[in-house]
Image: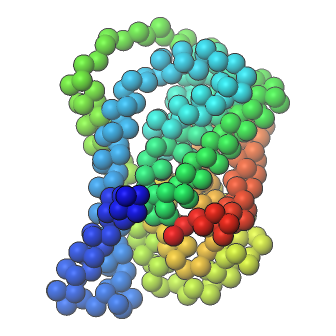
Amino acid sequence: MLSFIENAIFRMVWLEQFVERLLSVIGIDVTGRLGASLSFFIYDVIKISLLLCGLIFLISYFQSYFPPERSKKIIGRFRGIRANIIAALLGTVTPFCSCSSIPLFIGFTSAGLPLGVTFSFLISSPMVDLGSLILLSGSFGMRTALAYVFFGLVIAVAGGTMIERLHMERYVESFVRNIKSPDVTGHKLLVKDRLCFARSQMADTFKRVFPYILGGVAIGAFIHNWLPEDIIEGILGNNSPFGVIIAVIVGIPMYADIFGTIPIAEALLYKGASLGTVLSFMMAVTTLSLPSLILLKKVVKPRLLWTFVVICAVGIIAVGYVFNILQPKLNLYY
């Protein structure tokens, strides 16, 4: 049953076969580089778009039960590392990219929540949303997806806890602390309201991320069919001691969400890059993208910003090497 779900729903093998047959019927050789690239592009764009729309709708409907004010109240009931865990878990049901998580981070901070707790949320939100579990299952298998989410939550909880113990509250810009947090109780939403909210979120998010999907799939198609395997394997393969570090350094300046990075990760893995390397690349792109760091710089001072970057980067690199060690032992990635 698990195999059927992975192949038919997540990976959509039937769609891949349909695209290849359709291209063959119109006279395109899908075994050649150009035809294979076209097949890869069409299949991945359709697959990711279908999964994206379905996931955003479901997650947005669920998210309607956890508006910011309610999330603040939930997190505020806990103390210590339990608060970090709850914040990291709540981060999995929030928007898909790091930039869209920063306004909530500001809201939580201005509401008086502990700084480390808000950073646990900020790390978790783009890195391990519920959509990543489904999409990673389709590309890398359920075991890998679960391991990715687990280690992502570990980074979020550990990173927030470390920032909390460093007592860096004075490095938050003063205007953030002075923002008045409104007491919004809101009206009780009906099922119809929640469905309308989910549909609106689906449309808005799809419009926003679709260009990144096209770009990511195009890069993935190029890597998949045009770059020599020995180059990728030599730089990012299991035998490269610095592959994970290189992937993280390359990933930080980029800006994309999980939907735009998965096609690139698929292609890199196909060409011989190690699993830990490509997953570290995905974590770096989604969590430490340059635009999100620029936005974060406006609300925290440089010392706290660099502390956040270093903690996340070190955690992501460590997880990458752990994945490389666990891959043969746990039979990760089919």
Q: Which of 205 and 279 is in front in this view?
A: 279
Q: Farthest residue toward the front? A: 1
Asked if residue 17 lies left or right of residue 183, the reply is left
Q: Farthest residue toward the left? A: 26
Quadrant of the snapshot with the N terminus: bottom left
The location of residue 182, given as percent across then percent down, is 48, 10
Q: Tell how many labels.
A: 0
Above or below for 258 versus 41? above
| Viewer can see residue 190 | yes
Residue at x-position 47% and y-position 85%: 226
Picture quadrant of residue 174: top right
Residue at x-position 75% and y-position 56%: 318
Picture quadrant of residue 306: top right
Above or below for 89 versus 233? above
The location of residue 145, given as percent across then percent down, is 53, 55
Residue at x-position 47% and y-position 79%: 224
Picture quadrant of residue 30: bottom left
Above or below for 170 versus 93? above
Q: Nearer the viewer, residue 282 or 334?
A: 334
Residue at x-position 36% and y-position 26%: 64
The location of residue 39, given as percent across then percent down, is 31, 78
